[in-house]
Amino acid sequence: MIDAYGDPGTPDGRGGARYLWWLVLRQPGRCAAGAVFGSVWMVLLAATPYLMSRAVDEGLEPGDMGALALWTGALFAVNGVNSWLGIMRHRTMTRVRMDAHFRTVKVVVGQSVRLGASLARSTGAGEVVTIGVGDVQMISQSLTAVGPGVGAVVAYGVVAGLLLSVSPLLASVVLLGVPVIALVVGPLAGRLQGAETEYRERQGVLTARIGDLAGGLRVLSGLGGKGLMGEAFRRDSQRLREQGYRVGAVTSWMQALGAGLPMLFLAGVTWIAARLAAQGQISVGELVSVYGYVAVLVLPVMFLIECGYQLSRGVVAARRVAAFLRLEPPAGTGEVAAPAEPSVLYDPESGARVLPGRLTALTAARPADAVGVVDRLGRYVPSSATWGGRRLDAIALAEVRERILVADHEADLFAGPLREVVAGRRTAEDADVLRALRTAAADDIVRGLPDGLGSTVSAQGRSLSGGQRQRVRLARALLSDPEVLLAVEPTSALDAHTEAAVAEGLRAARRGRTTVVTSTSPLLLDRVDQVHFLVDGKVAATGSHRELLDREPGYRALVAREAIGESTGRSAEEAGEGAVR
């Protein structure tokens, strides 16, 4: 079985069929064993009617009890061995499927980690969830073809050869029967792939919508948009249901033909054999053997149709995985060394210049303009931003990530004890965690939880209020103590009193370190060293908060609107909760 901590290998992402073949090649011995066990198991099923015919012709009909006992004993031994082979076949194929399942999970998770922050820009969350929940299972199930599928082909050929020894006519009918069935069922497999592909795409969209609804239900309720989103979800789910009916219709025809056609075909073989026996062209024992062969043939023929069905669905699922694996993160192969000392960050697109060791604010009427500057300075989007005169995209990405941290106010919070949520992957003493929480004015969260730092926080911090989540995210960023901190709206969900405390704590904690915040709050802007006022994504004015109030009417109007909102004494979080109530 695949090592949970081992390297899953480099997958072949050039197509669905190539990816499935890569999964087979990653466990060749096990797949070969499954094919051998499946083949021998099915062939020995065909040996049962042969041994029965010998027992009838050589023992029962002439009355030779010794020959009857010999062939009966052989029949018992063969079936005993076949029972063991059936167990080994099932056990081996289970391991093949589990290996493919977990190997695919590992390569998908590895690709998600490799894409990092670019994942959200490359594909939707619903797509990744759909791959992890449904496609992985279909891929692993399709590998059944390497065991029973191969065995069905071998058994079919062996039975045709045995029938050739009885009657060339019967062997010809059997050999021509499966190609006819394939011609009937084959077009349905193509239709199934098309319907399944569209179904999976719609399922990904609906899964993403479910995540959006779950994450923003409180806000939607407060803004009165719950009904609108609910109606959109209802429409999407109805389209998915209709597409599911189309997939089910094709599937039902394939399964019906897979069960019905072999029976009709083999009934015809039995009828021909009975006519030959009545005409004296074959013996009674041979008639018994033909009937047994026909009964045995039902299994490999049904396996062949089932494997075709599973492979059709597996190829669709593998295509989605392969497409995901072909996504590439932003290039991080820069060879230019990062500045050895704190240096100026510069964004030519906006004209924003961030001086080292200072607390700088980006203010804009459209928050997206300020966030765009942060994304460029944090190297999360392609740009010509520089650091110490050197292009950011020419510096190794790992070094940029190590020294420049973008703290998003909606960054993910993983489930776990509060100390681990704040510490992240770092090992930190409780005193350091508490200090960071105190700087972010979040020490009241520790006091309010039953087990303090050991209290469990749910995924995305859903057990906390909006303001508490924001302060925990800020505390996590402060604890990491990066050389450059770019914080997006770090106080947007806080009331005026708490925001003032956070502003003072942030200024003290980051003294001498390069820090950038995006905000329109006068409480925070009054405590920064420099403010860049952005208009249409460009720096329109630069100075201290009070200087810009005196000389920039647009800045004064923007900040005055924010001040009016703060004068109510209610945080954005409290206003939203009040609307919900």
Image (tube, rainbow, N blue to C red):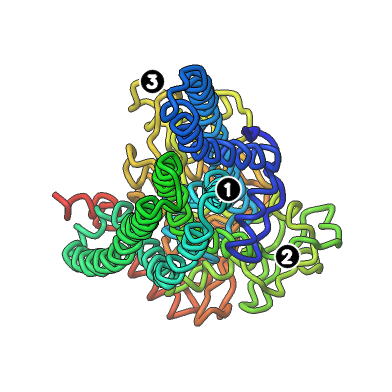
Q: Amino acid at mark 2?
A: Ala
* Residue 297 place in picture, x, y as percent: 44, 48
The residue pinned by badge 3 equals 451
> Regarding mark 1 in the picture, which secondary structure is present there?
helix
Given residues 95 and 387, the one toward you in this image is: 95
Mark 3, Cα crowd under 10 Å, few <14 / some 14-19 / many 20+, is few
> Regarding mark 3 in the picture, which secondary structure is present there?
loop
Q: Examine the rendering and report whether any part of residue 436 can be seen.
A: no
Residue 158 numbered tag: 1
State which tag comes first along the sequence, 3 or 1.
1
Residue beneath the point at 34% across and 51% down: 496
Instruction: Please say if 3 is above or below 377.
Output: above
Residue at mark 3 to residue at mark 1: CA–CA distance: 70 Å
Residue at mark 3 to residue at mark 2: CA–CA distance: 44 Å
Residue beneath the point at 43% across and 39% down: 285
Given residues 7 and 90, the one toward you in this image is: 90
Residue beneath the point at 48% across and 79% down: 552
Q: Amino acid at mark 3?
A: Asp
Residue at mark 2 to residue at mark 1: CA–CA distance: 56 Å
Q: Amino acid at mark 1?
A: Val
Given residues 157 and 392, the one toward you in this image is: 157
Find out whether the residues at labels 3 and 2 contact each other: C-beta distance under 8 Å: no
Residue 77 numbered tag: none
* Residue 14 place in picture, x, y as percent: 66, 66
Residue 331 numbered tag: 2
State which tag comes first along the sequence, 3 or 2.
2
Instruction: Please say if 483 is above or below 423.
Output: below
